[in-house]
Image: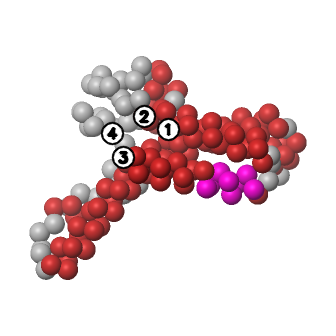
């Protein structure tokens, strides 16, 4: 309850907390933006195979969800460690390159994290502490994910 009181009574702390939360959610949205369309396509293919009576389906062998497989470098399959996955900061510290093979990491990942953080901050600034902020944040995050999926 002290944290809730602190967030409610200390506006700068509330804004900083929402910004950091926005960065973290932005990191998760990067996963959703990439994986959700792939998951849906695999499901549609599986349904089509089932409907057509085809038995071979290579996608069934490799699990693919929002949590599996773990995030990895697309060039060398290096598993991204937790400290290499800190929103925006890790990208800057790694200079936009994989720590293993030095392949370039797309700029879109930190930009989506930063966009989500900034828009979350704007929502919190506009609505202040309250349920409206929570609802507006959920809507904002969903719209970011949907927009980026459409852009892809």
**N-terminal of the two: label 4 or label 2?**
4
Q: On residue 72, which mark appears? A: 4
Task: Establish if 46 lies above or below 37.
Answer: below
Residue on which disc 3 sits:
152
Tell me the tag on residue 13: none
Q: CA distance from mark 3 to mark 1?
A: 13 Å
Residue assigned mark 2: 108
Question: Residues in magenta?
Answer: 132-139
Choose mark 3 or mark 2, whichever is in front: 3
Q: Are marks 3 and 1 in contact (CB under 8 Å)?
A: no
Q: Is residue 122 visible?
A: yes
Specify which label sits upstream in the sequence, 3 or 1: 1
138 falls in the magenta region: yes
State the mark number for residue 112. 1
Question: Disc 4 or disc 3, which is closer to the eye?
Answer: 3
Q: Earlier in the sequence, mark 1 or mark 4?
A: 4
């Amino acid at each position: 309850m002290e944290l809730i009181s602190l967030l409610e009574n200390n506006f700068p702390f509330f804004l900083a907390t929402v910004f950091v939360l926005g960065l973290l959610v932005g990191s998760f949205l990067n996963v959703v933006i990439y994986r959700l369309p792939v998951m849906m396509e695999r499901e549609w293919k599986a349904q089509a195979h089932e409907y057509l009576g085809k038995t071979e389906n290579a996608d069934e062998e490799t699990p693919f969800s929002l949590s599996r497989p773990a995030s990895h470098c697309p060039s060398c399959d290096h598993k991204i460690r937790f400290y290499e996955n800190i929103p925006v900061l890790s990208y800057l510290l790694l200079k936009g390159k994989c720590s293993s093979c030095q392949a370039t990491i797309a700029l879109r990942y930190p930009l989506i994290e930063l966009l989500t953080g900034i828009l979350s901050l704007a929502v919190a600034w506009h609505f202040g502490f309250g349920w409206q902020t929570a609802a507006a944040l959920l809507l904002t995050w969903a719209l970011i994910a949907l927009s980026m999926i459409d852009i892809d």
